[in-house]
Amino acid sequence: MPASLPDDLSRRERQVMDILHRRRDATVAEIMAELPDPPSYSAVRSILRILVEKGHIRHREDGPRYVYFPADDTSVIRESALDHLVRTYFGGSPEQAVTALLRSKDLGLSDTDVTRLRESIRRARARGK
C-alpha cells in the first residue's frame, strides 16, 4: 500500500494516523484519549476499520482488544511527508526549509545537536545527496 500520507483521508482519519505514527501503536481507548473532542467508541472503531480497509493500518490481538499500528514504516512516511513539505512550502529548497526550522523560536539547539546536524550533513554529502 502507499508509503506516504494519502490525500484521501478525512480529518478524523488523519488525526488517528498522526496518533498511530506518533505512538507507533494504540488501542481504541488510547486513540480516544488523544483525539480532540473524541467521537464515540464505536465511531473510532469505524474510523479504524476504514483505515484497515484502505490499507493504511493493521492490527494485532492483545487479549480481548486490538492494538492498531501503521501499515507502513513511520520513517518512510516521515521522509515522504518532509519531501512534500519542502516541495510545497519551500519551493523544493532544503536550505529554505532548514533555515525556517533554525529560525524557530522554540528550537533550542544544544551544541551537541549542532554537532550531530553537521555530521548528518557531512554524511548526506558523502552519499551524494
Image (cartoon, rainbow, N blue to C red):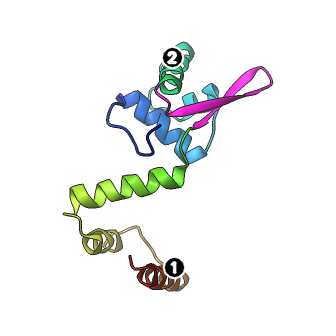
Q: Position of residue 54 (x, y in %)?
A: 46, 26
Q: Position of residue 34 (x, y in %)?
A: 53, 35
Which secondary structure is most common in the magenta stretch? strand
Q: Amino acid at mark 1?
A: Asp
Is mark 2 in CB contact (under 8 Å) with mark 1?
Answer: no
Label 2, on which residue? 46
Query: Which residue shows up at 31% across the image and 73% down it?
Result: 103
From the viewer's side, name the closer residue of 22 and 109. Answer: 22
Between disc 2 and disc 1, whose residue precedes? 2
Label 1, on which residue? 113
Q: Answer few, some or many: residues within 10 Å of disc 2's Cα (few below 14, many 20 plus, some between 14 and 19).
A: few
Q: Which residues are magenta?
A: 54-70
Q: Position of residue 122 (x, y in %)?
A: 46, 85
Location of residue 13 with respect to 49 vertically, above or below: below
- Quadrant location of residue 107? bottom left
Count of numbered tags: 2
**What element does badge 2 sit on?**
helix
- Quadrant location of residue 95? bottom left
Q: Among all residues in the image, which is located at the extreme right?
A: 63
Q: Which mark is residue 14?
A: none
Query: Which residue shows up at 55% across the image and 83% down it?
Result: 112
Location of residue 125 with respect to 94 vertically, above or below: below
**What element does badge 1 sit on?**
helix
Query: Which residue shows up at 60% across the image and 37% down it?
Result: 69
From the viewer's side, name the closer residue of 125 and 37. Answer: 125
Say whether residue 63 is magenta: yes
Q: Among all residues in the image, which is located at the extreme left?
A: 91
Q: Quadrant of the C terminus?
A: bottom left
Mark 2 or mark 1: which is in front? 2
